[in-house]
Amino acid sequence: MSNLTRRQDLEPYLTPEQFEFRDSVDKFLTKNSDPSMVRHWDEEKMFPAELVQGAVEQGWFALTLPEEYGGIGDYMDMAAFLEVVGYHNLGLARFWNANVNMVGGAVSRFASEKIKAEVLPDLAAGKCWLAFALSENGSGSDAAALRTKADLANGEFTVNGTKMWITGALQAKYILTAVRTDRDAKKHDGISLVLVPNGSEGLTVSPIDLLGGHAIRTCEVNYQDVRVNEDRMVGDLHVGWKRLLTVLAKERVALSAICVGAAQAACDLAREYAIERRQFDQSIYDFQAISHMLVDMQTQVDAARMMAYRAARLLVSGVPCEAEASQAKYFAADTYVRVATDGLQIMGANGYAMEYAMQRHYRESKLFQIFGGTNQVQRNIVARVLRKKGQ
Ligand SMILES: Cc1cc2nc3c(=O)[nH]c(=O)nc-3n(C[C@H](O)[C@H](O)[C@H](O)COP(=O)(O)OP(=O)(O)OC[C@H]3O[C@@H](n4cnc5c(N)ncnc54)[C@H](O)[C@@H]3O)c2cc1C
């Protein structure tokens, strides 16, 4: 029985079946994604194709999809799953989030029956990868200021523009692209969502070199007169922004669970190292300066975990949880950065060495304060809700 999967503090949240599911995820990833493999994929900037195929065979890419398209499970299963995946392999967790939670979720809720039938069973079967393209050079936090445009004529969109930082675009069969379809409308109106087939004439995908997250490349996607059939639209014309808001809210819950898992991995690594490492004829764990640091790290991860499961529970219950999802996301991301920073300090020079996973946590944790809406933007959301509550 693993401490990671069978935590007693999760008993009020998870069913016996969900604990068993976590055990099976842990077992599979312990075997198929050990730290040396993760290091290899990171250093070689290599997509872990075999691991992803194995995850498909485990049925993980059907999680949270509608039952009629072969799906299974809800957002509580998602949190329970992503925490364990985040512990072992952040790349797989991010890839799952973009494919299933974001684009799969948008298609499930807003696409035509024809598109659902075409995309969702293939997604669950690992035959159709998806990417989500909202951000641009000029519109990051202010995402609704996007300028990529799509003109609709004779049943076809013609798309022009450039999207930035698109996760998994190299593998994607379709890129769900947020486009401006009415240039005269106000900023949040006149936006639509279109599934653009990768490989379309005029579409180019170029990976960007980043500080971390190398196994799942993040890309620039350029659209030059890319023609897309009108039936590839997800949701109605011009109302894409409203649809995007629901996709982004779910992403925050997913990212919080991923960060909790990854932060727990960093804590465990630092604790195990501190107990083993001897200086001045004693384990460095016995220096109070070190053990207190480890205690603070674990306390913060435990608090982040409770916030992540609170947000997931509210999401499943259909209770509005905009603030709780944002709190969970920013607190978990800040916790991961703090834990990775202190964990590296505890490991001294070995923490800074490529041989150990701590340097990767140090690099990758920072990403979570930026993507999925920066932590400043999350605080803005919470501030807005808090003000209303005070009225
Ligand atoms: C590895 C990676 C993967 C990504 N994957 C995707 C993807 O798959 N699809 C996609 O569409 N995008 C993706 N993104 C983009 C990501 O969502 C944006 O980076 C993010 O929204 C922030 O935008 P920006 O980087 O342009 O920062 P900016 O918006 O320029 O912000 C710069 C700074 O100003 C602060 N700031 C901005 N506005 C405010 C405000 N109102 N109040 C307070 N502070 C503010 C920010 O918090 C930040 O500190 C990814 C990014 C990365 C790094």
Image (spheres, rainbow, N blue to C red):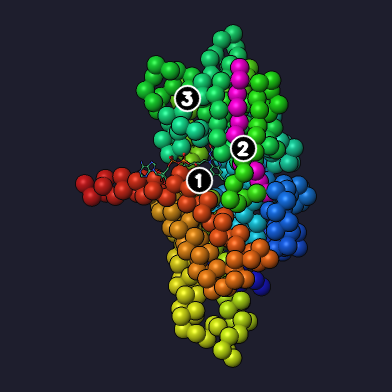
Residue closest to the far top: 154
Residue 105 is situated, as x and y percent measured from the top left of the image, at: 57, 39
The disc at residue 371 is 1
The disc at residue 219 is 2
Q: Which circle, 1 or 2, is nearer the viewer?
A: 2
Judged from the image, the secondary structure of the residue bearing numbered disc 2 is strand
Instruction: Inspect this view and state whether residue 344 appears.
Output: yes
Magenta residues, as a range? 215-225
**Left of 94 or right of it: where is 181?**
left
Lower position in the chain sequence, tag 3 or tag 1: 3
Instruction: Inspect this view and state whether residue 230 appears.
Output: no
**Label 2, label 3: how many angstroms apart (C-alpha)?**
18 Å
Q: What amino acid type should be assigned to the residue bearing mark 2?
A: Cys
Residue 383 is situated, as x and y percent measured from the top left of the image, at: 31, 48
Judged from the image, the secondary structure of the residue bearing numbered disc 1 is loop
Q: Mark 3 points at which residue?
A: 147
Lower position in the chain sequence, tag 1 or tag 2: 2
**Left of 88 or right of it: where is 308?**
left
